[in-house]
Image (cartoon, rainbow, N blue to C red):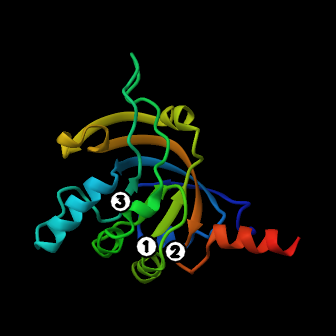
Amino acid sequence: MDEPGHRVIGLTTPLTAADVMGLQAGDAVMISGVIYTGRDQAHRRLYEALLRGEAPPIPLQGQAIYYVGPGPAPPGRPIGSAGPTTSYRMDPYTPLLIEHGLKAMIGKGGRSPEVKEAMRRYKAVYLTVTGGAGALIAARIKESQVVLYEDLGPEAIRRLVVEDFPALVVNDVHGGDLYEEGRRRYERT
């Protein structure tokens, strides 16, 4: 097996437990298929619906959610700039979504111990994309449609069709943490 951080792995949604079990912190992934968007207010609504015992209003089983509030679409494009949002704002809601089948989250910044434990327990991963590269990321988004919570404007939940959407595995199901590994390497020098 290649050393973590030196592999590029193609993924197609929906993801399976086997898909995420094979990932290691530091791996680069290229995602194709459908992913959903959502930020803190949308997550709060999803969380509250699940607490009420309602079926998830979007598919969660095997799915990926990208933490983004995209800019308006320029002429001829499905979406505007689509850079990542800071992920910890979704942490209070995320463990329950993972328990209901969410397999990947995409954002920036670290995650809480509770989210990391839910990822290990229910076999999910956390991915990051480069902040400030929103226009480049948007080029990998082929379709964009608001599907839920339209009243939230740019924070509404969108269904995106992506092709070779680039991300890095930060937290894997085995407890690997790319940010912690980087910190340890830096502290040794």
| Residue corresponding to mark 2 | 21
Q: Quadrant of the C terminus?
A: bottom right
Q: Is residue 80 left or right of residue 158?
A: right
Residue 129 visible in rendering: yes
Marks 2 & 1, CB-CB < 8 Å contact: yes
Q: Quadrant of the N terminus?
A: bottom right
Task: Determine which quarter of the picture holds residue 4.
Answer: bottom right
Q: Marks 3/1: CA distance? A: 11 Å
Looking at the rendered structure, the secondary structure element under dot 2 is helix
95 to 110, vertically: above or below: below
Q: Is residue 91 left or right of residue 140?
A: left
Q: Is residue 163 left or right of residue 22?
A: left
| Residue corresponding to mark 3 | 63
Give whichever of discs 2 and 3 has the lower sequence position. 2
Q: Which mark is residue 17?
A: 1
Q: Nearer the viewer, residue 48 or 123?
A: 48
Looking at the rendered structure, the secondary structure element under dot 1 is helix
